[in-house]
Amino acid sequence: MSDKEYITKTVIHVGTKNINFVPGTKVIFHFKTTKYDSDKTLIDDSRTMGNPMELVLGKKFKLEVWEAIVQKMALNEVACFKIHKSLVTAYPFVSKTLREAGKPQSEKRNHHCCGVTLQNEGIGYADLNELIKHPQDLEFTIDKTKTYFKMKLVSKNIDKDGKGSVALVPENTEDMWHAYNIISEGDLVSCSTFRKVQMESATGSSNSYRVRTTLTISVENIDFDTQACVLRLKGRNVEENKYVKMGAYHTLDVEQNRKFTITKVKWDSISLDRVDTACDPAQNADVAAAIMQEGIAHICLITSNMTIVRAKIDQVIPRKRKGNVSQHEKGLARFYESIMQGILRHINFDLVKCVILASPGFVKDQFMDYMIQQAIKSDNKIILENKSKFLLVHASSGFKHSLKEVLADPAVISRISDTKAAGEVRALESFYTTLQMDPARAFYGKKHIEKANTAQAVETLLISDKLFRCQNIALRKEYVELVENVKDSGGDVKIFSSLHVSGEQLDQLTGIAALLRFPMPELEDESDEGSDSEND
């Protein structure tokens, strides 16, 4: 039987853009599964389940045929695929998992799935049991809505001594942040750029024009523009070029979707881990937050490595006056409407797992009531279909720094427990608790941590990525060796992003702290002696 007989595609709606897929690409799509019979019997519909399907290519998904068919589609295309029964034997088990995703354990239909028991009892759903006993061809109607890429690793050539180069293509804002942390002063960076060139004619007149060329510079200065999402690298040209002299200064702009190559004399473990993290498709922006108080609100996206403020809303709300509250209520309504529009504009509900609404008092509750009422009036399906993703928690203010206490809330932790940001907040909370209850097991500052590391006492090391961007190469090397030593002795290392609220707080504690396996009161004594000598 030919491949065409196994998979037959019918285009229902033509897509908008063809995509070159690579391993690690995340594809988000809605699907409808029907039997290939005269009645087109419906089995599953992701829209009634509540969430689209998220598939990361190259991760050996149980239903391999889905990876094959989504790669045959363009962005925003809708297509129907008839699949031979031999390729969908795993579908009943995939369907069971999708149907029960997010349900409490008490509501899941737990049945044995092995041997004779599987044949007799099935997996808890009559229609899926029928498919297991009597396999048949299936039809999948796929509506591919989104495709997300991670940093693309083009090449990696590093010798056993750590010298070599890595070529990357950043795809989004977070990739640019990773690039900022990977590139150090003294590195060689190559990428395509524009250069203004002057040419003199035979008559003596000169003309200037811009040419595209590839330059390699030795980096002397690094600037990351978070708003424009551009990384600007200044340095001297180190390779012969038709348009730029050796040693001439040039500024390279590293931008999204443009390949660049980094060459280092020594790739340390921190830089290599950062490359692996940047290219890991599991890292994504899956939490959003709207922090508010009357008149002020901040809408933020919380990614694995950054807290990005997408919108700030600052409006004057008239005070309540005796016998006349209408102006106050109108001002509140305008304020709530601005927040609602900001949420719709800046939050991608296909991607986020949770949207946190936080405020002092009842502001968050009043806003939630307003938003649902407006969504019902205007039939806003985005809000209504994602109502369950909103989580209301207390915050002390409507400013960004309140995110720390919000992310430490038990209700929030239970919803976002698998995110890097939540892990950082938990680690910092644990450090502060230990510092208060058992101070001989919690220390901060490079000197104390190094002594604890010498005694192999560090259980958890908290360190800011800001320390790895220091211009002093010898000092950076000391921090890298400290991280490697803690890992070698079985300790856990958490590298905090300085663009997260928790990272900002760690920076105030010198950027490095540790929880110890056992108390070391002698370090406390050293602190006391140091403060006494300073007072003298």
Image (cartoon, grey):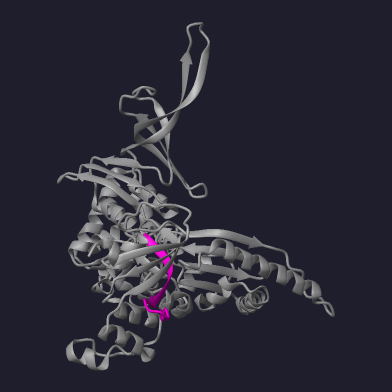
Classify residue 412 as left or right of residue 151.
right
Classify residue 284 as left or right of residue 311.
left
Q: How many marks?
A: 0
Q: Which residue appears farthest toward the top when viewing the image? A: 203
Q: Which residue appears farthest toward the front when viewing the image? A: 38
Q: Which residue appears farthest toward the right when viewing the image? A: 323
Q: Is most of the magenta stretch helix, strand or loop?
A: strand
Task: Please tell me in which quadrant of the rendered image residue 51 appears.
Answer: bottom left
Q: Nearer the viewer, residue 481 or 135?
A: 135
Q: Where is residue 262 shown, x and y percent of the image?
A: 30, 41
Above or below, 427 against 269 in this view is: below
Task: Please tell me in which quadrant of the rendered image residue 24 appears.
Answer: bottom left
Q: Where is residue 403 shown, x and y percent of the image?
A: 50, 68
At a point 23% along the width and 54% down the height, the residue shown is 481
Q: Where is residue 3 shown, x and y percent of the image?
A: 26, 62
Q: Which residue appears farthest toward the bottom when viewing the image? A: 120
Quarter that holds the C terminus: bottom left
Q: Nearer the viewer, residue 368 or 259?
A: 259
Instruction: Let me know if residue 321 is in the magenta part.
Output: no
Above or below, 404 against 259 in this view is: below
Q: Nearer the viewer, residue 69 or 449?
A: 69
At a point 58% along the width and 73% down the height, the residue shown is 381
At a point 43% along the width and 47% down the height, the residue shown is 256
Q: Where is residue 80 shown, x and y percent of the image?
A: 41, 67
Q: Nearer the viewer, residue 375 or 343?
A: 375
Quarter that holds the N terminus: bottom left
> Which range of residues does the magenta coloring cover?
26-43
Can residue 303 be seen at all in this image of the molecule? no
Task: Please tell me in which quadrant of the rendered image residue 213 appears.
Answer: top left
Above or below, 141 against 323 in this view is: above
Can residue 57 be seen at all in this image of the molecule? yes
